[in-house]
Image (cartoon, rainbow, N blue to C red):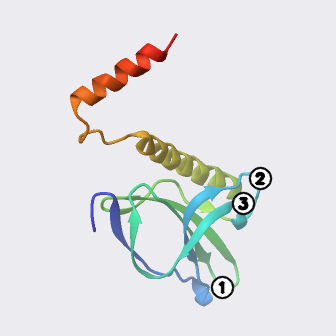
Amino acid sequence: MTNQTTARIEITTPYGSGRRKGWYKLVTGVDTTKSDGYAFAGDSISAGQHDLAVGSVVIAKMPSGSAKNNESIGRVYVVNAGGMEDVAEDYDWDTQFLALRDAVAEHVGAMSSTENQADKSIDLSSVSIDDLLAEIARRAGGAK
């Protein structure tokens, strides 16, 4: 872990029977009008170590079943200080995709809401009390 707002995670490429590869994606947005993997905006995450922001949403498409009877599982993770936490049930990529998409959208929306609240805060520790009071008085005087 590099600091309190990022966590170091280890990504390993999931393989299924027949050497089918899965993938991970750092999700930055979800288009709920789409009903396939293109619903997820963001960058693919390669195997290896990555420093990701705490609260980031990561999805995984993992191969399951045999080479002949293959299927894929969708999994939703949220990055926390200790790594990645699996925050939802496993979804069958083909039959439960819309539920997976909506679960990811919910977590990405929660992340965006938290980021927006953090962006609105301003560090006023370097502003004197007198200057703050003068600004409050100026604004109160202008309100009618």
Q: Position of residue 82 (x, y in %)?
A: 30, 61
From mark 1 to mark 2, how far is it between C-alphas?
A: 31 Å
From mark 2 to mark 3, how far is it between C-alphas?
A: 17 Å
Which residue is nearer to you in this view: 128 or 24? 128
Check if mark 2's residue and mark 3's residue have beta carbons within 8 Å.
Answer: no
Mark identifier at residue 95 = 3
The three-letter amino acid code for the residue at tag 2 is Thr
Q: Say which quarter of the image contains residue 23.
A: bottom right
Which residue is nearer to you in this view: 29 or 133? 133
Check if mark 1's residue and mark 2's residue have beta carbons within 8 Å.
Answer: no
Which residue is at 64% across, 50% downward? 102
Would you place residue 133 above or below residue 110 in this image? Answer: above
61 relative to 125 in the view: left or right: right
Is disc 2 placed on a helix, strand or loop?
Answer: loop
Q: Report the residue marked by disc 2.
A: 33
Mark identifier at residue 67 = 1
83 relative to 93 in the view: left or right: left
Q: Say which quarter of the image contains residue 2.
A: bottom left
Which residue is at 56% across, 62% downward? 27
The three-letter amino acid code for the residue at tag 3 is Thr
Label 1 vs label 2, nearer the camera: 2
- Packing grade of label 3 (10 A; few <14, some 14-19, many >=20) is few
User: Which of marks 3 and 2 precedes in the sequence?
Assistant: 2
Label 1 vs label 3, nearer the camera: 3
- Packing grade of label 1 (10 A; few <14, some 14-19, many >=20) is few
Q: Say which quarter of the image contains residue 133.
A: top left
From mark 1 to mark 3, how far is it between C-alphas?
A: 19 Å
User: Which of marks 3 and 1 precedes in the sequence?
Assistant: 1
